[in-house]
Amino acid sequence: MTSVEIEPAVAASIFGDRIDLARRFTAALADQGEERGLIGPLELPRLWTRHVLNSAIAAPIFQGTAADIGSGAGLPGLVLAIARPDVIWTLIEPMERRVNWLSEQVTELGLGNVEVLRSRAEDVRATGKFDFVTARAVSALRTLIPFTAPLLRDGGEIALLKGVNAPAEIEAAAKQIKKYRLSDVRVEVLGEGVLDETTRVVRATVRG
């Protein structure tokens, strides 16, 4: 049986007084994630490092209202909602079994700042509603922009968790960046000197 990664010491400093909720969520994901098709068996030995902390390190970026597109197992949406109870989160996920998981976790963890919405991002009737939109491991930037940018108010931001190819994705999305009026498009590297694996966030502001 694959063993679950031991909680890294840095987790407590990242989550602060919310660490117990983070532990409960991570334990539930480790226990049920593979069986429910949320994560693969190879993810258990790096569940904290690669997934939970990789998501949580981005928490200081967000404020106001935020949407997570394609929440899946709750990465990053549920993790961010745990870390930032002052932000109002909408988790958008089309698959019923994942929606069920997200809803169960919201109830189990008592997260009053979260709404789970079963929908595809392109079908969401929330144009211009959010201050921030995020996504992790969903699709390429050029595909994500048409789904995410319309959900933002004027001056709102996309903050998309990406891999090492983030700069190349920005280049490939030049047409979409122009069409959806994104400005100050940049890659921010988070967690250097703190996490074993840094997190790259593509950030940009929507201008009306």
Image (tube, rainbow, N blue to C red):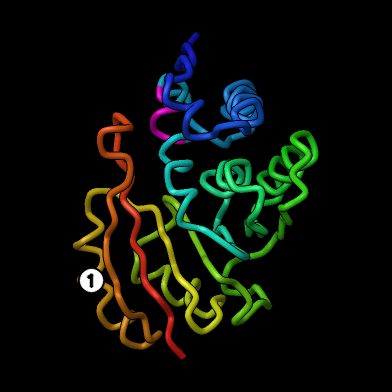
Residue 96 x, y percent position in the rendering: 71, 50
Asked if residue 191 lies in the magenta stretch, the reply is no
Q: Is residue 149 left or right of residue 151?
A: left
The residue lying at 36 percent from left, 80 percent from top is 182
Reply above or below: 101 against 59: above
Q: Which residues are magenta?
A: 46-51
Q: Position of residue 42 (x, y in %)?
A: 41, 24
| Chief SS of the magenta region | helix
Residue at 68 percent of width and 78 percent of height = 125
Residue 184 is situated, as x and y percent measured from the top left of the image, at 30, 75
Name the element at disc 1: helix
Q: Amino acid at mark 1?
A: Ala
Is residue 49 in the magenta section? yes
- Residue 94 vertical placement versus 180 (above, below): above
Answer with the quarter of the image where residue 104 lies: top right
Residue behind mark 1:
172
Q: As drawn, which residue projects farthest toward the bottom?
A: 208
Question: In terms of depth relative to the viewer, which is nearer, 147 or 182?
Answer: 182
**Which of these two is toward me, 28 or 12?**
12
Crowding around mark 1 (Cα neighbors within 10 Å: few <14, some 14 to 19, many 20+) is some
